[in-house]
Amino acid sequence: MEISPIAIFHSPFHTKFGVPRQSGVVPHLKGKIVFETAYRNHDYIRGIDEFDYLWLIWGFSANNHQSIRPTVRPPRLGGNRSVGVFATRSPYRPNPIGLSSVRLVGVEDTKDCGVVLIVEGGDLMDGTPIYDIKPYLTYADSHESAKSGFTDTHQWQQLDVVIPKEYQTFFSSEDIAILTEILRQDPRPHYHNDPERVYGMPYAGYDVKFKVNDGVLTVVEMMKI
């Protein structure tokens, strides 16, 4: 089977570092879905604005190798316990295909790109190819009492975030709130715990540099890329 992208996702993340590890954990993080030329006919999305959420089927385009290992070590488990790759959402899979639920907040008609979908809560980096879009159906897709495996017993430890006032002027108050939520998720690799190490996260045209010490993430520098 051969598949090709129907659209490209655009987000503030130009690298995979810092991208939320799951869709929905940063609910107000905005992204745009720009259709490929062949799919810019408005008929392809007729009725889509009647749905609040969409499923995106997409490709892990930043992973340059195919995984053949049967187990992975999820960050949620601290990288210390192996589980089967099909029992995780690891991006390293036999077929590098992702699945995300995003909230549809708008449909725009643009001069250069035709119809564009504005969504929130994505976990995709800029330039990610999208292979299909399907509506989210509450009666079929929502299972409130379902077990969620190791995520039920190993909660993700969020960080306290400090962004000095001199850097808060770089973004709007809304964007600062979104950036704070992103940083709270702890973008670092799960095996890193050096309080003196400075990390750089490209975000929305800026290089956001930060340190993490004793559960507190502090932005130490912010520069235009």
Image (cartoon, rainbow, N blue to C red):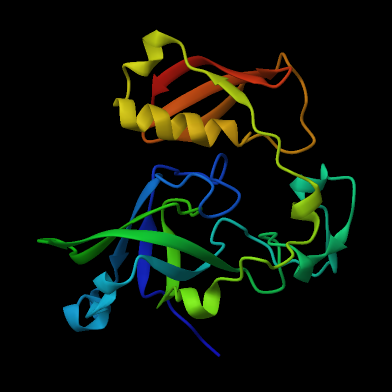
Q: Identify which residue, 61 or 187, lies in the foreground.
A: 187
- Return the x and y of residue 57 as percentages of the image width and height: 49, 72
**Please, is residue 117 above or below residue 122 in the view?**
below
Q: Relative to the observer, which residue lies in front, 58 or 51?
A: 51
Q: How many marks?
A: 0
Residue closest to the far right: 81
> Which residue is at the far front?
145
Residue 90 point in image, percent of width and height? 70, 59
Residue at 55% in and 31% down: 183
Q: What residue is at 74 percent from the left and 17 percent from the top?
A: 214
Q: Residue furthest bottom?
A: 1
| Res. 47 image quadrant | bottom left
Left of 212 or right of it: where is 137? left
Q: Is residue 152 left or right of residue 35?
A: right
Q: Nearer the viewer, residue 223 or 190?
A: 190
Quadrant containing the N terminus in the rendered view = bottom right
- Quadrant, the C terminus: top left
Task: Kindly identify the residue that appears in the image at 45 percent across and 32 percent down.
Answer: 179
Q: Position of residue 33 (x, y in %)?
A: 32, 62
Q: Residue at x 25, y 70 (%)?
A: 49
Residue 184 or 142: which is nearer the viewer?
142
